[in-house]
Amino acid sequence: MLQTIGIALAALAGGVAPALVSAALFGATFIGISTIVLATGETTSSTRKKSMSTETEILRTVVDRWKSAVDAHDPKLVASYFTDDAIFQGLHPYSVGPEGVAAYYEVQPIGMTAHYDVRETKRLAGELILGYLAVDFRFLDKPTLSVYLSLIIRSTPEGWLITHYQVSRLA
């Protein structure tokens, strides 16, 4: 509305003074709109950062439990952090469900530990979060094995559990 008045004033009344008032009205409106847009953008960006932080915190909670059980060489505890229909792909043939997870970790050497860095998180849906991690598996008697791990965790009545686990070994 102020922009319209400013344009009309400049068109209807000639001279420098009406042109300056017109410019001030137009400029003030532009600055006001820009301020609102920037403030909204900051709110949206802040909300997005908070959401990513929350997603990362949820993922870290799940991965910390998994890591603790792996480090303790407790295959049944590791498996308890997976859903009944979890697809599990380590460096051996895949399995479905906690039994396959337990069998996989049962044959891992005593002293193997996992050290991870979360690279990315993304909420896929209300109750699903994707995590992409770099993981170093360290051993007592052989070199560290560095892999990338993609996880999908799902909110369940028992809490957040791993529903998909995919390891990639990139050279």
Image: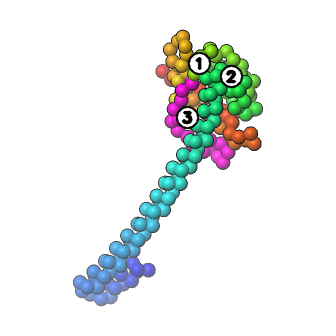
Say which element carries label 3: strand
**Looking at numbered disc 3 in the image, what kind of residue is underneath it?**
Tyr
- Comparing 152 with 139, the one in front is 139
What is the crowding at mark 1: few (fewer than 14 residues within 10 Å), some, or many (at least 20)? some
Residue that lies at the very extreme toward the top in this rendered image: 141
What is the crowding at mark 3: few (fewer than 14 residues within 10 Å), some, or many (at least 20)? some
Report which quarter residue 150 is drawn in.
top right
Numbered mark located on residue 132 in the image: 3
Task: State the image coordinates of residue 165 (x, y, percent, origin top left).
Answer: 64, 30
Q: Is residue 47 magenta?
A: no
Q: Is residue 148 left or right of residue 19?
A: right
In front: label 1 or label 3: 1
Say which element carries label 1: loop
From the image, tell me which residue sits under label 2.
74
In front: label 3 or label 2: 2
Residue at the image position 66 percent from the left and 48 percent from the top: 126
Task: State the image coordinates of residue 29 (x, y, percent, origin top left).
Answer: 39, 74
Going from the N terminus, do you reach mark 1 or mark 3 first? 1
Marks 1 and 3 in Cβ contact (< 8 Å): no
Q: Is residue 147 left or right of residue 84?
A: left
Residue at the image position 74 percent from the left and 28 percent from the top: 97
- Comparing 17 with 83, the one in front is 83
